[in-house]
Amino acid sequence: EGFADDGGNLDVVHALVEYSRSGINGTAGSSVDVSDVLFKDNGQSLGLQYTSKITMTGDTAINGASPGGIVYQLLSKALDLSGIYDDHAEGTGMLGLAILGSTFVTSTWAGGDLPLVMGFGAVSDIVPSGVTLTLGPGTIVKGVKNGDGTENPILEIQGTLHAVGTSSAPIVFTSVNDNSVGGTSGSGKPVAGDWEGLYFPAPLQGNSVSYG
């Protein structure tokens, strides 16, 4: 079954988690550190709801989820991406960090080979007014369409989205079915309409989404 956190502090560092159904899951408390953990042959590696700043660095998932399952997933109403970097996934499962119905605080995603996967659930992930979400060069964002037929933007930008890549490390927004970047996450047969897009409820004056 794995092990669940039910509102307590969570510190799992330099550990091996293998052959479980759900890895590390639950609702975390004020301290969350999951770093340098090897997840191996699990039904799911990590699935957390939390309200605190998370540290999640140097983790590796090998066959980290069942076929079609999500390797890493987070849900938070105060999601700070700055402490999440240098994590990896390979083998079975949807290779990526799935963000489920979350609200961001001002923070920076460093990029890397682990995609962000957005678009799950009945609501969009939100960058609120006054908040800046920065996506570093090389970031891969994959969008998914809900299985229930509803179509929500993967990201609603009420504040600022700063997404500036480089010619050698562009920022990519694509379908979860696009396996040509960021590893295997879907069918490998992307088509137009696989994901709903980004949504700016206000005019785009003063905002930009760009890549090199």
Image: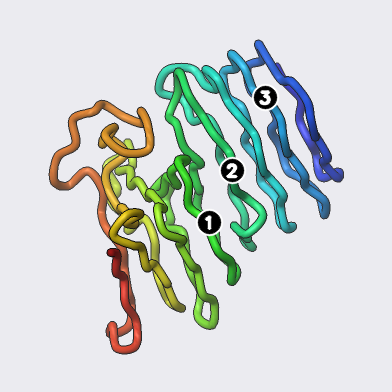
What is the three-letter code of the residue carrying label 1?
Answer: Ala
Which residue is the site of mark 3?
38
Q: Could you give the CA–CA distance between mark 3 and mark 1, rounded to whole angstroms?
A: 21 Å
The tag earlier along the polypeptide, 3 or 1, is 3
What is the three-letter code of the residue carrying label 2?
Answer: Asp
Quadrant where the C terminus is found in the figure: bottom left
Q: Where is residue 171 in the image (x, y as percent from the top left)?
A: 34, 57
How dense is the environment of label 3, judged by Cα within 10 Å: few (below 14), some, or many (20 and up)?
many
Which residue is the site of mark 2?
86
Residue extending farthest front: 168
Q: From the viewer's perspective, is residue 62 above or below residue 29?
A: above
Name which residue lies at 62% across and 17% down: 40
Q: Is residue 119 left or right of residue 70?
A: left
Q: Quadrant of residue 198?
A: bottom left
Which residue is the site of mark 1?
110
Q: Is residue 78 left or right of residue 142?
A: right
Name which residue lies at 47% across and 40% down: 114
The tag earlier along the polypeptide, 3 or 2, is 3
What is the three-letter code of the residue carrying label 3?
Answer: Leu
